[in-house]
Image (cartoon, rainbow, N blue to C red):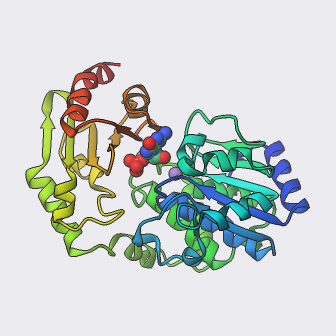
């Protein structure tokens, strides 16, 4: 038995919405990651199994290493098929907002979702959820939104309707948001859930290979370059940073998702408590923060880099040059280390 984390009144509210309505849309955050796509497809296949008319809409494209998932080709990309996506949103009776806690996280879809007439349900694990949904299921202590979706479906009494496609997607969500169960994954119940998913037919070793053994040689070379030429260590701050310019990314033919995971590599170095990855995008510097223990990188991100996230994993952005972004980080970091 797994414990009842989600409050009973929330379960009842979701149950009512699902029982009474047919047209359901699922949305998740911009630059969707494994948990965003995995939790969304997990819910998608479940709702499809119980004969709901369900669509999954994402603001922009997701990385190739998630393409193998069943249903990935049915995902509607809002920025590409705006009119069709808008029609689905207009007709929806219920909208599930998965793996994000604030309206800014869906960028171009923000107004469309906030103004939609549908009842909205947030299922998420980021702290400080904004109040824009009718039902807010937010539990930051949970490993991933995928885990929350599993818990939600079970509490609806519908475990039997988790088909293999749903189980695979939920497993992928949990695996990717915990670095293949190497952080944020000390709750023993995670492994009870994995066991249940495996009994449904999930082949976890195969999924690991689909996700982590699916990159290009260029990506590996970019990683090598990043570590040998671009890694900077601040021993007194127990911090490491890596930065990559547009030109450097282009030189290695970097594709969407290619720098995923780079931020975690410096933790292999003894004594590193904080790792930051700076990537130059078209019009801004995108920043990923990771930390160990009590060092709250989401505070650095919120205070200075217009972002947010979890205590140990956050993201943000900076409008200016790479040097300015790094200089700002160097200036403010000592304060957060001392907290
Ligand atoms: P990543 O570094 O993998 O892109 O993101 C790490 C965490 O920070 C994720 O939980 C993600 O949701 C959050 N995050 C990433 N970028 C942003 C951002 O621009 N704004 C906010 N609020 N959160 C972000
Ligand atoms: Mn997540």
Q: Residue at x 28, y 37 (%)?
A: 274
For the question of whether residue 53 can be seen, the reply is yes
Q: Quadrant of the N terminus?
A: bottom right
Q: Position of residue 253 (x, y in %)?
A: 22, 68
* Relative height, residue 51 to residue 39 (above, below): below
Picture quadrant of residue 312: top left
Q: Residue at x 24, y 52 (%)?
A: 265
**From the viewer's perspective, is 116 left or right of 178?**
right
Q: Residue furthest left?
A: 229
Q: Residue at x 79, y 45 (%)?
A: 10
**From the viewer's perspective, is 160 left or right of 140?**
right
For the question of whether residue 5 can be seen, the reply is no
Picture quadrant of residue 273: top left
**From the viewer's perspective, is 234 left or right of 43?**
left
Q: Residue at x 52, y 76 (%)?
A: 69
* Relative height, residue 81 to residue 246 (above, below): below
């Amino acid at each position: 038995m797994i414990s009842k984390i989600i409050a009973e009144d929330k379960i009842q509210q979701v149950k009512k919405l699902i029982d009474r309505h047919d047209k359901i849309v699922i949305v998740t955050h911009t630059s969707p990651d494994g948990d965003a796509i995995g939790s969304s497809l997990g819910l998608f296949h479940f709702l499809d199994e119980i004969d709901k008319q369900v669509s999954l809409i994402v603001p922009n494209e997701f990385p190739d290493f998630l393409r193998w998932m069943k249903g990935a080709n049915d995902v509607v990309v809002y920025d590409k098929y705006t009119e069709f996506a808008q029609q689905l949103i207009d007709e929806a009776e219920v909208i599930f907002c998965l793996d994000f806690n604030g309206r800014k996280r869906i960028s171009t879809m923000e107004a469309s979702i906030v103004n939609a007439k549908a009842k909205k349900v947030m299922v998420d694990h980021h702290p400080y959820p904004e109040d824009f949904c009718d039902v807010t299921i937010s539990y930051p202590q949970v490993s991933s939104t995928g885990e929350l979706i599993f818990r939600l479906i079970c509490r609806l009494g519908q475990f039997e309707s988790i088909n293999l496609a749903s189980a695979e997607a939920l497993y992928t969500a949990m695996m990717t948001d915990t670095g293949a169960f190497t952080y944020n994954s000390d709750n023993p119940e995670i492994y009870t859930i994995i066991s249940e998913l495996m009994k449904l037919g999930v082949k976890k070793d195969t999924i690991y290979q689909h996700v982590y053994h699916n990159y290009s040689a260029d990506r590996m070379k970019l990683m090598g370059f990043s570590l040998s030429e671009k890694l900077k260590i601040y021993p007194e701050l127990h911090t490491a940073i890596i930065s990559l310019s547009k030109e450097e990314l282009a030189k290695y033919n970097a594709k969407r998702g290619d720098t995923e995971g780079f931020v975690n590599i410096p933790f292999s170095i003894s004594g590193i408590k904080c790792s930051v990855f700076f990537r130059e995008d078209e019009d801004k510097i995108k920043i990923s923060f990771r930390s160990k223990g009590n060092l709250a990188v989401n505070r650095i991100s919120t205070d200075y880099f217009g972002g947010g996230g979890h205590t140990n994993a956050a993201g943000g952005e900076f409008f200016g040059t790479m040097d300015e972004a790094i200089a700002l980080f160097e200036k403010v970091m000592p304060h957060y280390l001392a907290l």
